[in-house]
Amino acid sequence: MTPDSSGSSEVEARFFDPLDDELPLSAWQALGDAAADPNPFFGPSFLRPYLRHMGVRRVKVLAVEDRSTGQWLVAAPIQIRPAGLLVPIPAAFTTDYGPVGTPLLHPATVAAHAKRFYEAAAGRTGVLLLPDLPLASKAAKLLMDLDGVTGVVTGRSERASHDGGPEGQVQFDEAFKGKRRKEMKRLLRRLEDEGAVSLVTVEGGAVTDRFEAFLALEASGWKGRENTALVSKPQTAAFSRETVVAAASAGHVRIDELLVGGKLIASLVAFVEGGHVFAWKIAFDESYARYSPGAQLVLDTFQKNLATPGFRLADSLAVPGHSMIEPLWRGRLETGTLLLSSGPLAALRNGICSADLGFEQTVRQMARTIRNRLKS
């Protein structure tokens, strides 16, 4: 146990089995709801279904808990994994279905709590890896500034996002002007020739049925043909359905839809937490591609975000350079992999892990190049 900076309470770092029905789910959920940096992918609504259905083992949730109240102050899923391809170290558990590695931090969290989290996670290795970490987050800034801990950021990249308030409005006006504005309006008028056009938002109890409509739409397109749609595999179908139902019951899911004559032609599923919108999945009817239904919906979602009270940030979760969303969502969210290490060999440990990460990236790039050549 370590006293916090005020010495008024004691905190303890504990590891939990995330699938154990005896773990304090209410404390975990409360931290997710209050987190200074919202991250739906580290909360129970996402993580428990994912681990239950996707066959992932040896992931533990590390929580720094105020023992006097039972309140969780810091939490993240931790797994021992290679830094790149060779060096096994503790790391925050992220996936392609949830590429956000921000630990959940209560707004009252101070450096002593964050230090306790790092020490427990790193254990005897003295090293902790935090992939997919938004570098402007409070968690990143707090962890990078810990006394006696050396931090190194590798693999920096930027993906599409947009802000709220006046800055977000400026971003929207920049994206939706001139030739693009005229073209998008022209395409929308042409689409109206196919039937009455409606742009709707679904929340609450209606989400479950409309998510099924999304799944069918996604499976009807190229993802279905390439066997990468959520319903293409039983495990992804089960995990995604359970996740959306659980998150929707807490009011954390929104589905934006574009319909023509009552027919769904584009759908965007987003997680909504703490003034942040995470654009999780999007699909559109390819037979309407000439009308740019995906872009039409993304612009509508942008406007709806800006009109939502308390909205602060939208994260596209898209790969950097995404051809459809980057011209429309003009903000950029910088992410990276944070390596934390302490002790006299901190620099050496970080150097070894950084080299391993670089090696992995080189191998992955070579594999992509080979695949592309085989396809051509």
Image: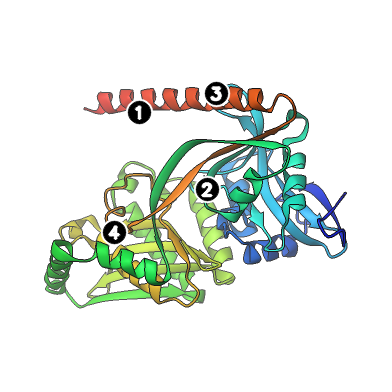
Q: Are marks 2 and 3 in contact (CB under 8 Å)?
A: no
Q: Report helix, strand or loop for mark 2.
A: loop
**Residue 306 versus residue 285 in the image, above or below:** below
User: Type of residue at label 2?
Assistant: Leu
User: Type of residue at label 1?
Assistant: Arg
Residue 356 numbered mark, or none? 3
Closest to the camera, between mark 1 and mark 2, is 2
Residue under label 1, please give it.
Answer: 368
**Residue 210 versus residue 105 in the image, above or below:** below
Q: Report helix, strand or loop for mark 1.
A: helix
Residue 338 numbered mark, or none? none
Residue drawn at x 27%, y 55% is: 327
User: Type of residue at label 4?
Assistant: Leu
Q: Quadrant of residue 330?
A: bottom left
Residue under label 2, please give it.
Answer: 135
Whole-Å distance between the Cαs marked 2 and 4? 22 Å
Whether residue 274 can be seen here: yes
Task: Please tell me which of labels 3 and 4 falls first in the chain.
Answer: 4
Residue under label 4, please give it.
Answer: 328
38 left or right of 307?
right
